[in-house]
Image (tube, helix red, strand yellow):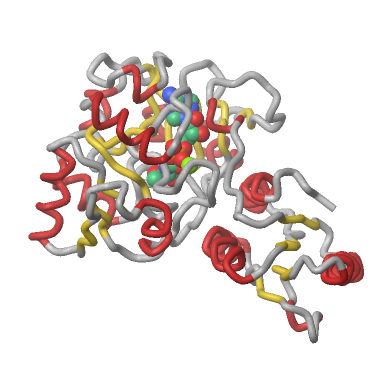
Amino acid sequence: METRYLQFNDAHLRCAADLIRRGELVAFPTETVYGLGCDATDEQAVKRTYLAKGRPSDNPLIVHVWSKGQIPEIARDVSPDAQKIIDCIMPASITVVLPKRKIIPDCVTAGLNTVAVRMPRSQQARDFLRYCDVPVAAPSANTSSRPSPTTWQAVKEDMDGRIAAVLCGSPCDVGIESTVVDMCGEQPLILRPGIVTADMLEELLGKKVRVVTDPKEKVNSPGVRYKHYAPKVPMALELEGDEQKLKNLYLKLQAEGKNPVLLVENPQNFPGFNVYCIGQTDREVSRNLFSNLRALEKNYGYIIASFSSKTAFAQSILNRLVRSASHNVV
Ligand code: TXA
Ligand code: MG
């Protein structure tokens, strides 16, 4: 299949929306990562999404809307707390898990009786969704297990020839995926951390929010179980900013012919090394994280990343880094 590369103008948005309504797959930008969209009410289109990504069929998809008015059409029994999130935070980088309505086929939710609903903050995303005017199921637009795409060029790397079109929008501003919060029980439960943190939700709801931290904990978000975000080359992660340790590991790997590269907070402290900056602030680290991994895997044989920030948002970044490194924390 020849993939079309579309721009953000009226004619191309119409074309993208027509493709969606005909059951085709179209990748589009959001403020978090690029999504691989299809009509969430079209079972065949949803199945093609799993195929295009090579995604296990027991890992459910998020349903995207452009208007809050669409939410009651796909979800039911929205609790007062969930409604508060919808009213006060959305559109934002948050996904709310709610009891689902029948209009959403079981293959979207991997058989769960809940649906994950997201209204992106990105104007480009909402423009595209408005043209579609059907709920759009969209996982991140990467091949399963790869770093999520944060530019249309990264989508092209993984999806060229496999999907009908890519909407070529801006690079993603947040850079890691939305916070997923399960609002079906009494206590809100964060299944996947993101830029909307537990503190922010606690402040809004005036109650304790639980965060799933142990990946072995049996939770209703199958996605957190799988290998994820991994570059094509091995990766190690250091968490204290211990520069001597980083240098020692680099020199050892270099002596073994592994062609290592450092991705650190202060590259100026590593003269003579192959070294890149992971970012000066949490926002910069998260914005560039996946594109850094995709860039470095092309030229180096081993990525050594260092990240020592301890803020609430840093925990969400760490969640991705640890899995990118397949838990190889040194
Ligand atoms: O920022 C994002 O959320 C991006 C953009 C494209 O919107 N999307 C994204 O989708 O990250 P994906 O498929 O890569 O991750 C969806 C996550 C998975 O961990 C999945 O298990 C979880 O959401 N999920 C989806 N439906 C669920 C449900 N009904 N209950 C619990 N978890 C669910
Ligand atoms: Mg994903």
Q: Is residue 94 visible?
A: no
> For ligand 1, which image quadrant applies?
top left
268 horizontally vs 256: left or right? left
Residue 143 appears in the picture as rendered: yes
Q: Position of residue 3 (x, y in %)?
A: 24, 55
Q: Position of residue 80 (x, y in %)?
A: 40, 22
Residue 93 position, x and y percent, is 43, 46
Q: Nearer the viewer, residue 11 or 96?
A: 11
**How many numbered circles does the render carry?**
0
* Residue 259 to residue 330: above or below: below
Residue 69 vs residue 227, the one in the foreground: 227
Up-down relation of residue 98 to residue 55 (above or below): above
Could you tell me which residue is drawn at 33 percent across and 55 percent down?
160
Quarter location, residue 109: top left
Res. 251 image quadrant: bottom right
Tell me what residue is drawn at x 36 percent, y 40 percent. 52
Q: Residue at x 54, y 58 (%)?
A: 290
Nearest the eye: 27 or 75:
27
- Find residue 122 and report its horizontal and vertical position in percent: 33, 55
